[in-house]
Amino acid sequence: MGEFELIQKYFSRAVNDARVSQAGGDDCALISVPEGYELAFSIDTLLPDRHFFSDDKPEHIAQRAMRVAISDLAAAGATPFCFTLSLSIPEVNEPWLQAFSDSLYREAEFFSCPLVGGDTVRGPLSISLQVQGLVPKGKMLLRSGAQVDDIVYVSGSVGDAAAALHVLTENMQLNQHDQVWFEDAYYRPQAQIQLGEKLRDVATSAIDISDGLAADLGHICSKSGIGAELDLAAIPISKTMRKNFDVEKTMEWALSGGDDYQLCFTAPKKCQQEISKISVELGLEITPIGKIVSEHGLRSVRKGSGASEPIHSSGFVHFG
Ligand code: ADP
Ligand code: MG
């Protein structure tokens, strides 16, 4: 099977979106950005044995690739619009391609984000997705807007994906519910698109947690020229994590593990009610975990006592 036959067979499904005037099949894709919107775009490359296991199921790889890429749109408050795929594969393995393509199209459908073009080459396995999203003009969420006294929030729970990596690589035997929980955390991260959209008029800054809460909140701090104080006891840890791992380990993963793809964001105190409302509407836990301060860097503060300690994001953490 040659390149063109392959593209035709696996990556050329029709696009039904009036804003996409030309999808695959020509030299360029052509899209119209609706009046009053801006185009936000981002690219992510996934490599075997770095971002996924090379013997992972192709449907899992596609799912993860799509959600990791889409998560950047969520963090920007952008609504998914369309994406392109640059695929390097060592050989034509049809069952692999079929499963990968089916899964990719399922994800595309779920996020209303059609595949509009790409590139296909022979080489070491590598998957790059460039995602495009739409944001009302001037409304993109940045890392740089956090203000002193803002509250720091995080969605969902954190640390699960890092724990999942441990469960998978150590071949831990858990009960079925817990096994599925961790597999989902790793292979099916929940790109928080709806939350990002709702935060456009509320949050002062936002980021998706790909490198670990401490590191990613650290990016908000450095870009915004401020610091943050966290109440470590408030950081949301899932029940399944608590059940299977001790406090030290869960805290380390929560702060320094990556791949959660939850959103960490800041918002003024006056928005607390609005944020509770969003949490209820989305059925998504949103937890205040600290506040923005003028002193640079990340510190942990224990409720009640004024004592604070620096948090190091590189895996070693002071607490307790
Ligand atoms: P060119 O040589 O002009 O770069 P290609 O031969 O690489 O074009 O691709 C032919 C068409 O197929 C293009 O419209 C391109 O967008 C599309 N295409 C190639 N690879 C993929 C892919 N992996 N997924 C979706 N569309 C693809
Ligand atoms: Mg090409």
Image (cartoon, rainbow, N blue to C red):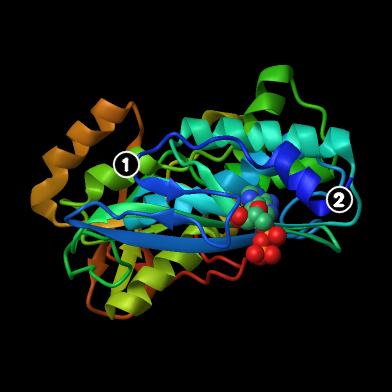
Towards the viewer: 147 or 14? 14
Residue found at the very far top of the displayed protein? 176
Residue displayed at 12% across by 53% down: 269
- Which residue is denoted by mark 2 in the rendering? 2
Circle 1: residue type: Leu
CB of residue at label 2: within 8 Å of ligand 1?
no
Of all residues shown, which one is farthest toward the front? 26
Query: Which dot marks residue 253?
Result: none
- For image coordinates 53% across by 69% down, the residue present is 313
Query: Horizontally, is 270 left or right of 40 in the view?
Result: left
**Mark 1 neighbour class, 10 Å CA radius: few under 14, some 14 to 19, many 20 or more:** many
Residue 16's x, y, as percent?
Answer: 44, 34
Q: Is residue 124 visible?
A: yes
Between discs 1 and 2, the one toward the N terminus: 2
191 or 20: which is nearer to us?
Answer: 20
Q: Amino acid at mark 2?
A: Gly
- Count every numbered label the image shows and give the total: 2
Q: Circle 1 sits on which residue? A: 195
Image spot of residue 278 (x, y percent): 23, 35
Q: Secondary structure at mark 2?
A: loop
